[in-house]
Image: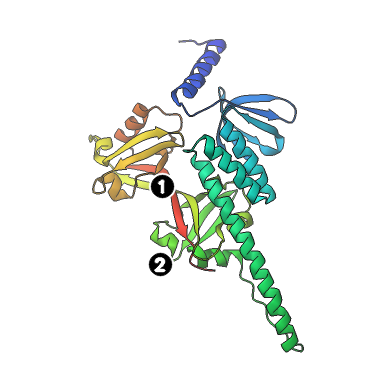
Amino acid sequence: MYFSEESIHLYKIIIFIALILTATTLYADTVILKNRTKVKGLVVDEYVDRIALSTIDGEKHILRKDIDKIEYDAPEQNFMQLGRAYDEKGWYDKAAFYYKKAMDINPDYKEAMDAYVASHAKMWREEEKRTKKDIELHNMAIEWRTRKNKKIENVVKSKESLVKESIGISIVEHEGVFRINEVIPGSSAYKSGIKKDDFLIGIWGRLVRYSKLEDVLKELIGPKYSEVKILVGKDISVPAEAGMNMYKELGMSLSFEYEGLMVKDIISDKKGGLAGLKKGDFVIAIDNNITRYLPMDSVIALINNPKNNKIVFTVRRNINLRREGE
């Protein structure tokens, strides 16, 4: 059967409109480039140097250096943009103000809540740094007066060491992707179920891909006994048997939310729970098939038709870690 170019384009438009209409919390966004070109779509992911925009022609990545501004139909998202702009300048009090305005409009806006808490944590961290600096200067003056003729060795811990002591992980970066390289037994990360070869996806609701390693480490460091909320990605393999209703055997229910396909509930002693899937996990892919644009019947079909006697779920999981070191 032959489809004309016009009919294919019309089909894309219909699918795109359906995507907007079937998700009541989604809005059409307009990306205005520096050359004054306008691109219409849905901002589905935001990174430090680019955005992922879902359009009628597919998903596109647009570099921030090419963007003049982004106009959202949702007013709370515009306040989020203002908050992020102040956040990047280090004006955390002003950032918190706009995050709060976004929360006032939409009390269920998780990204705004995370950003608001993170901005206060950053203010706390800056205040702690100033206090420590004042104490250090005072101690240095005393040390200088008492040990004028002696050299004092100043041991400065690296950011990598501080992160390892604080939350119990070391991370490595490759082409903008951050992988957990080590998990310290008994640490906060270890107790939360983070494993070696998991991926660090986000911190305080902000995606970290394409960021600098130094900036990521800086975000993970904070005052002793404080918390940091991270987003971790992991592959969870579930044994499968041919001819079984695997969706039923998994013992879990799935639902499409604004953030993606979520595990709404799970029975701990069924296949899914025993393999390590948890309530609240977001399923990003099933056997490398991205779930973002799949209808639920296609998701169930993937689960019920496994390959190689197993199903691999790629999930993202929000985890609160308590900092234990200094």
Q: In front here: 17 or 195?
A: 17
Q: Quadrant of residue 78?
A: top right
Q: Position of residue 24 (x, y in %)?
A: 46, 26
Decide: is 137 above or below 242. Answer: below
192 relative to 81 in the view: left or right: left
Relative to 246, residue 238 above or below: below
Amino acid type assigned to the residue bearing label 1 in the image: Asp
What residue appears at the point 43 percent right and 62 percent down from the top-left corner?
188
Name the residue rendered at 66%, 74% in the picture. Answer: 135
Dot label at residue 245: none
Label number found at residue 186? 2
Residue that mark 1 sits on: 235
Q: In terms of sequence position, does the residue under pointer 1 or pointer 2 come before the other?
A: 2
User: What colour scheme does the image use?
Assistant: rainbow
Quarter occupied by residue 320 = bottom left
Residue in the image at 35% along x and 33% along y: 302
Q: Nearer the viewer, mark 1 or mark 2?
A: 2
Front residue of 176 and 99: 99
* 259 relative position to 34: left or right: left
Residue 34 in percent (x, y) is at: 74, 31
Task: Rate crowding at label 2 as few (under 14), some (14 to 19) or many (20 or more) other CA atoms within 10 Å.
Answer: few
Identify the element where label 1 is drawn: strand
Look at label 2 and name its amino acid.
Gly
Could you tell whether 227 is left or right of 267 in the image?
right
Would you place residue 210 above or below residue 254 in this image? Answer: below
Q: Residue at x 61, y 44 (%)?
A: 97
Give the image location of residue 193, x and y in percent: 39, 56
In the image, residue 42 sits, relative to residue 200, either above or below, namely above
Q: Distance from label 1 to label 2 (Cα)?
A: 22 Å
Would residue 43 be seen by someone viewing this image from the given angle? Answer: yes
Q: Quadrant of the N terminus?
A: top left
